Image (tube, rainbow, N blue to C red):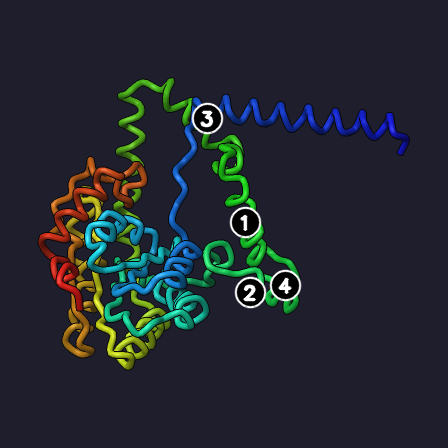
Amino acid sequence: MAKGGLQSALWVVGFAVATLVVIDVGLQRLTPLPPPLLEVTDGVGALRDGDPDVLAIGSSHTRSFAPLRDAIQPGQQMVLVPVEAGSFASYEWVFAHRLRPLLKPRLRRVVFVTTFYDLCHKADHANLPGRAWTLGDFLVDVSARGLDDFNRNYLLRRMNRLFRPSVLVQTHGTDRILGDVKDRLRPAAVHEEKRLAALARWREVIEGEYTRCDDSDEKAALYRMIDDFQARHIEVVMASFPLMPSSLSDKAKATTLKRYADFLASLGRDRGVRIVDMTLTAPVADADFMDDFDHLTLPGNQRFSAWALEHDLSFLKAGP
C-alpha cells in the first residue's frame, strides 16, 4: 500500500475509534459502568500473595463478605474466591486447579458461602472457562476438541476484562442500555407492575428448583472437598446466604429450602461441619436486594456483614 493510502486508512481507523469512544462515554450517562467485580483470579492472587487464616469460596454471593473480610483484618486475613454462577462441582474444580497448590499452613478455616442452588444439576459448567480458567486451560481444551461455544467463553470474558472502561463491552451491546432508557421513560406504575411480574416468576423458579437441586454429583464434589480440608485439620463452615424475603413462597420454604436445610444439618451431624444457616434468619429486607431479587446492594452487604460478624459469624473474630 502506498504511503498516502496507509495514512488515509490510519486516519479512518483513528476517527472510527475516537467516534466509538465518544459514543461510549456519552452512553455512560444513560447506563453507568458497573463496578468491577471480584473474580476467581483476584482471589487466587490474594491467596498466592498473602497468608490467610480464612478462605471463603462460593458463588457470586461470596462478594457480599467483602465488608466482613475487611472488618476482621488486620488481626486475621480472609481471602474471598467468588465463582460466578457456581455450584459445588465448580468450586471443586477451582479448588483443585487454582487453590490447592497455594494453600499454606496458616489456613485453618474454610467457609463455603452457599445456597440451595449449589446442589442444582448442571449439564456442564460453562461458567468455568470465563471465570476460572487460565490461558493454559484454554489452550489444552482447544487442542483437544477445537474452538467451540464452551471454551469460547474464556475469550469473551478476557475481552470483557480488557475493556472494563467500555460500557458497550460491559453490557454486551446496546440491549441493556436501551432497557435503561425505556425504564427511565416508563411510568412508575408500569415499572412496578413489571417488577412484580418478574418477582412472581422468580418465586416460581425457586419452587421449581426442588425438582433438580439435589444432585448426587454436586454432593460428591462437596464431600471430596470436605474430606480434603479436614485431612489438613482445616475447619469447614457452611454459611447459608440469606435470600430475599418476598421471593420465598410458603411452598418454596417447605420444599426447596427445607430439603437443603436438612442436607446442611446432616453435614453437621455426620461430618463434623459447622453449620451457619442464615437463609431466613438474617435481618435483611427486600430493599436490601438488587433488582435481580438475589444479590444484596452495597448498603445491604454492609448491614448484613456487620450483623453477621456480631451474631451468627461472630466466631470468625476469635480465629480458629
Is there CB contact under 8 Å for labels 4 and 3? no
Q: Which residue is mark 2?
A: 137
> Foreground residue, 16 or 280?
16
Amino acid type at mark 4? Val
Would you place residue 24 above or below residue 68 in this image? above
Give the Cα separation between the discs numbered 3 and 2: 34 Å
Question: Could you tell me residue 197's position as x and y percent?
Answer: 29, 35
Classify 10 Å Cα crowding around label 3: few (below 14), some (14-19), many (20 and above): some
Which of the 4 quarters of the picture holds residue 154? Answer: bottom right
Q: SS for tag 4? A: helix
Q: Residues within 10 Å of mark 1 (few under 14, many from 20)?
A: some
The kind of residue on which mark 3 rests is Gln
Q: Nearer the viewer, mark 4 or mark 2?
A: 2
Q: Is residue 293 left or right of residue 312?
A: right
Callout 2 amino acid? Asp
Q: Position of residue 258 (x, y in %)?
A: 17, 61
Q: CA distance from mark 4 to mark 3?
A: 36 Å
Q: Earlier in the sequence, mark 1 or mark 4?
A: 4
Between circles 1 and 4, the one closer to the viewer is 1
Check the picture and name the quadrant holding the N terminus. Answer: top right
Which comes before the other along the chain, label 3 or label 1?
Answer: 3
Of residue 200 and residue 219, the one placed in the foreground of this image is: 219
Numbered tag placed on residue 28 in the rendering = 3
Query: Which mark is on residue 142?
Result: 4
N-terminal of the pair, mark 4 or mark 2, is 2
Tell whether label 1 touches label 2 (CB within 8 Å): no
Residue drawn at point x = 28 percent, y = 70 percent: 107
Q: Nearer the viewer, mark 4 or mark 3?
A: 3
- Which residue position holds label 1? 158
